[in-house]
């Protein structure tokens, strides 16, 4: 892909952007507030960001809401985060449905409370016919857990005699991941200044561009997303090849 530094706003290219929404706790601490208020402000930031995303050429947004490691937090904080997921879907689902947003939750469903599961499944089924914009919420999600679950599911098929080990390819393996319905993200953003992946989309991040932004998640909005996209557009994605040179496969084809 060529460089497009001067081209903004981007054409509607159907970008998939994934965000590690980080910094709620520090945002609250700086204001002398409890962490729970940081998480609440984080939900408002999510609303703003989803609202602004489609105007920036983004077709799909995946947000990291709760990791398989976030169970290590104090029980009170865990239940606040569970509560916020419920509140978000209860209060926003009508609008999301009306605005043509398709909602999917990715991650492990085992271990989630029945009422959360019900809300999540309702949000998915109510928006199943929407195609204008895709919102994926990674909840009880861990990249390693997702890879292990996919490996188990394939192993089970082999055990049942329905597949053979040699049939496994990257494409087939991917189809067992909880993110299988979406293409891999083009861009992964992490807010709050931390520069790590924290078990997010480990398989899917192979060729994603990474952008780290200083802003704490509760202060995030479309203007920050726009800046991240502008940075992304200045990157050259090579996928292991050499830019401007034909691939060896093409040369062989041309010669032959
Ligand atoms: C992100 O903010 C929200 C979740 C991880 C659920 P944090 O709660 O991690 O905020 P910091 O990193 O402690 O500031
Ligand atoms: C990653 O952030 C998880 C989410 C944003 C949901 P964390 O705050 O949990 O990650 P670490 O602990 O700083 O690596
Ligand atoms: Mg954090």
Image (cartoon, rainbow, N blue to C red):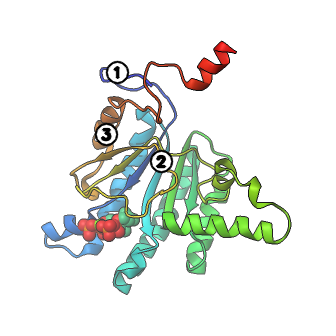
Where residue 150 appears, as percent x and y from the top left, is: 64, 64
In the figure, 248 relative to 138: above or below?
above
Secondary structure type for disc 1: loop
Q: Earlier in the sequence, mark 2 or mark 3?
A: 2
Looking at the picture, tell me which residue is in the foreground, 2 or 73: 2
Residue of label 1: 7
Q: Is residue 139 visible?
A: no
Q: Residue at x 67, y 70 (%)?
A: 152
Q: Are marks 1 and 2 in contact (CB under 8 Å)?
A: no
Where residue 72 appears, as percent x and y from the top left, is: 38, 81
Residue of label 2: 206
> How far separated are the C-alphas under marks 3 and 1?
14 Å
The tag on residue 228 is: 3
Where residue 139 appears, as percent x and y from the top left, is: 49, 66
Horizontally, residue 67 falls left or right of residue 146, namely left
How many other residues sit within 10 Å of disc 2, few (<14), some (14-19) or many (≥20)? few
Residue reaching furthest right?
161
Q: Which quarter is ligand 1 in?
A: bottom left
Where residue 235 appears, as percent x and y from the top left, is: 34, 32
Q: Residue at x 46, y 40 (%)?
A: 186
Secondary structure type for disc 3: helix
Q: Are marks 3 and 1 in contact (CB under 8 Å)?
A: no
* Distance from mark 1 CB to nearest ligand 2 atom below 8 Å: no
Looking at the picture, tell me which residue is in the foreground, 251 or 200: 251
The tag on residue 161 is: none
* Location of residue 40 by image quarter: bottom left
Horizontally, residue 106 falls left or right of residue 217, namely right
Looking at the rendering, in which quadrant would you find the N terminus? Answer: top left
């Amino acid at each position: 892909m060529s460089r497009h530094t001067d081209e903004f706003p981007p054409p509607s290219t159907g970008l998939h952007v994934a965000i590690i929404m980080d910094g709620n706790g520090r945002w609250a601490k700086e204001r002398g507030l409890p962490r729970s208020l940081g998480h609440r402000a984080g939900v408002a930031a999510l609303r703003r960001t989803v609202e602004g995303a489609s105007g920036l050429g983004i077709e799909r947004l995946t947000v990291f809401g709760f990791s398989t490691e976030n169970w290590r937090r104090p029980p009170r904080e865990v239940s606040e985060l569970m509560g916020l997921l419920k509140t978000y879907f209860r209060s926003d689902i009508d609008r999301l449905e009306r605005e043509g947003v398709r909602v999917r939750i990715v991650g492990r469903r085992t271990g989630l409370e029945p009422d959360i599961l019900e809300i999540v499944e309702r949000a998915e089924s109510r928006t199943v016919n929407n195609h204008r914009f895709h919102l994926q919420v990674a909840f009880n999600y861990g990249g390693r857990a997702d890879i292990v679950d996919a490996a188990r599911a394939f192993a089970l098929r082999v055990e049942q005699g329905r597949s053979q080990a040699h049939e496994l390819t990257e494409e087939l393996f991917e189809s067992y991941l909880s993110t299988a319905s979406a293409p891999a993200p083009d861009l992964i953003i992490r807010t709050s200044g931390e520069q790590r992946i924290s078990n997010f989309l480990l398989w899917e991040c192979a060729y994603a561009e990474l952008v780290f932004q200083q802003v704490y998640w509760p202060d995030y909005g479309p203007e920050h997303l726009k800046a991240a996209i502008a940075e992304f557009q200045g990157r050259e994605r090579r996928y292991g090849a050499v830019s401007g040179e034909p691939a060896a496969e093409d040369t062989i084809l041309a010669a032959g």
